Image (spheres, rainbow, N blue to C red):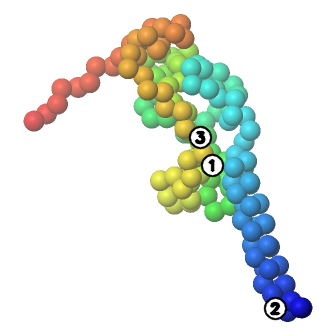
């Protein structure tokens, strides 16, 4: 019993495609800067900036600070939330998120790592990191 050459050709195409997909998946999982792995929730924002450098978008606590690294048809993005407006440079980071976003899209295509601790008592959270919790009062709602 002999196997035709078209079978081997199709098998080689399938194997080549499988290898290409596996390499793309590997690169997607490891394509962002490795120093982003050292960022942890609970660090001060000044520690994060010393690890990652200055953010591409420094929002001073109004929105998360953003670090970006281009990759293929999009970019890797590190978002780190903090309260620098109230706390200053020693503000504690509260969330960390690493995503891959296509160019021109504001929504992530791939969420690789997300740390959003379910904090119920913010005063205790800040005390655990040696900080004082200073909430900003919300303006009154218009009706």
- State how far apart marks 3 and 2 are (Cα): 43 Å
> Which numbered tag is attached to residue 50?
none
Q: Quadrant of the C terminus?
A: top left
Decide: few, some or many residues near mark 2? Use Cα within 10 Å; few <14, some 14-19, many ≥20.
Answer: few
**Residues under numbered marks 3 and 1 in contact, where contact means CB atoms less than 8 Å apart:** no
Residue at 46%, 14% (x, y): give it.
Answer: 125
Of mark 3 and mark 1, the one earlier in the sequence is 1
Where residue 43 appears, as percent x and y from the top left, is 60, 20
Decide: few, some or many residues near mark 3? Use Cα within 10 Å; few <14, some 14-19, many ≥20.
Answer: few
Name the element at disc 3. strand
Q: Is residue 4 left or right of residue 29?
A: right
Name the element at disc 1. strand
Q: Is residue 26 left or right of residue 85?
A: right
Residue at 81%, 91% (x, y): give it.
Answer: 6
Where residue 72 appears, as percent x and y from the top left, is 68, 61
Where residue 59 appears, as percent x and y from the top left, is 49, 34
Q: Is residue 14 left or right of residue 78?
A: right
Compared to 98, does 46 lie above or below? above
Question: Foreground residue, 119 or 12?
Answer: 12
Where residue 4 appears, as percent x and y from the top left, is 85, 92
Q: Which residue position is annotated with label 3?
A: 113
Of mark 1 and mark 2, the one earlier in the sequence is 2
Residue at 74%, 54% (x, y): give it.
Answer: 26
Q: Which residue position is annotated with label 1?
A: 76
Q: Can you tell which of label 3 and label 2 is closer to the viewer?
A: 2
Question: Foreground residue, 54 or 122?
Answer: 122
Q: Which residue position is annotated with label 2?
A: 6
- State how far apart marks 3 and 1 are (Cα): 11 Å
Q: Can you tell which of label 3 and label 1 is closer to the viewer?
A: 3
Question: Foreground residue, 124 or 139?
Answer: 124
**Residues under numbered marks 1 and 2 in contact, where contact means CB atoms less than 8 Å apart:** no
């Amino acid at each position: 019993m002999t196997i035709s050459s078209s079978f081997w050709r199709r098998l080689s195409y399938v194997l080549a495609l499988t290898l290409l997909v596996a390499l793309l998946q590997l690169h997607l999982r490891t394509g962002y800067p490795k120093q982003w792995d050292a960022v942890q929730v609970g660090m001060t924002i000044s520690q994060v900036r010393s690890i990652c450098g200055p953010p591409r978008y420094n929002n001073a606590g109004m929105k998360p600070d953003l670090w970006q690294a281009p990759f293929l048809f999009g970019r890797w993005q590190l978002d780190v939330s903090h309260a620098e407006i109230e706390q200053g440079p020693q503000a504690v980071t509260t969330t960390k998120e690493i995503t891959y976003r296509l160019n021109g899209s504001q929504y992530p295509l791939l969420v690789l790592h997300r740390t959003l601790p379910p904090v119920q008592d913010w005063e205790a959270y800040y005390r655990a990191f040696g900080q004082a919790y200073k909430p900003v009062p919300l303006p009154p709602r218009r009706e």
